[in-house]
Structures are given as C-alpha cells and as structure tokens.
C-alpha cells in the first residue's frame, strides 16, 4: 500500500473510531446508531469519508446527513487485527 493510501487508510479508520465512540457515549449500541455527519467528519476529511464508505466501514443514510458504523467497520477497528 502506497504511503498516501496508507495515510488515507489510517485517517479513514480514525473517522470510524470517532463514530464508534459517539455511539457508545449515549449508551446506544455502537452498531446501528446514526450520528450527524457534520459532528463526526470535518470538512477536510471528505476523501477519507469516501474511502471509509468504499471500504464498507461506514454507511451513509439516504439523505447523506447521517452516518453509522457497519459490522465490517467495527471489526476494522478492533485492536490487534492489523489496523
């Protein structure tokens, strides 16, 4: 994986971690909890957001204003699995 892609990969996983943490803060199930896109993703992270969606780590709601972690995304941020 090229250096640029590796950095994008790492930054995209950071978005997944923030979203995962947001879901657990309110006592919600981490999976299935929708969060406002503008709370989780900074304007400068649009490319990383797209990458995370392409990887299947997060899902955008039909209106594209809400995001949530997928099961694949939760697995991607588990410590010790190479991420």
Image: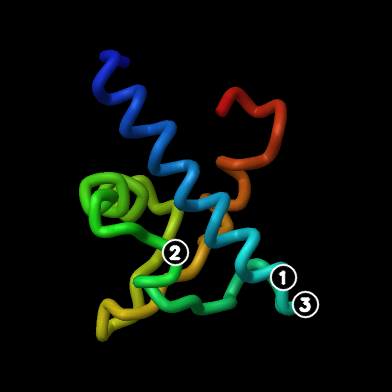
Separation of residues labelled 2 and 1 (CA atoms): 13 Å
Instruction: Give the SS element for disc 2.
Output: helix
Instruction: Write down the residue under mark 1.
Output: 25
State the image coordinates of residue 31 (x, y, percent, origin top left).
62, 68
Name the mark on residue 40.
Answer: 2
Residue furthest to the bottom in view is: 63
If you read the primary sequence from the N terminus, does the residue marked by circle 2 or circle 1 appear first?
A: 1
Q: Residue at x 22, y 47 (%)?
A: 47
Evaluate if marks 2 and 1 touch, with contact meaning CB atoms under 8 Å apart: no
> Are the residues flagged by discs 3 and 2 in contact, CB closer than 8 Å?
no
Numbered disc 1: secondary structure = helix
Measured from the top left, where is residue 50 in percent x and y? Answer: 25, 52
Question: What label does residue 78 carry, if any?
Answer: none
Q: Nearer the viewer, residue 3 or 73?
A: 3
Q: Quadrant of the N terminus?
A: top left
Q: Residue at x 31, y 33 (%)?
A: 8
């Amino acid at each position: 994986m090229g250096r640029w892609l590796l950095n994008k990969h790492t930054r995209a996983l950071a978005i997944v971690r923030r979203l995962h943490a947001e879901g657990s803060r309110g006592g919600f199930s981490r999976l299935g909890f929708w969060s406002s896109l503008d709370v989780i993703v900074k304007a400068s992270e649009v490319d990383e957001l797209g990458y995370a969606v392409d990887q299947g780590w997060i899902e955008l709601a039909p209106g594209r204003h809400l995001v949530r972690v997928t099961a694949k995304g939760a697995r991607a941020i588990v410590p010790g699995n190479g991420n």
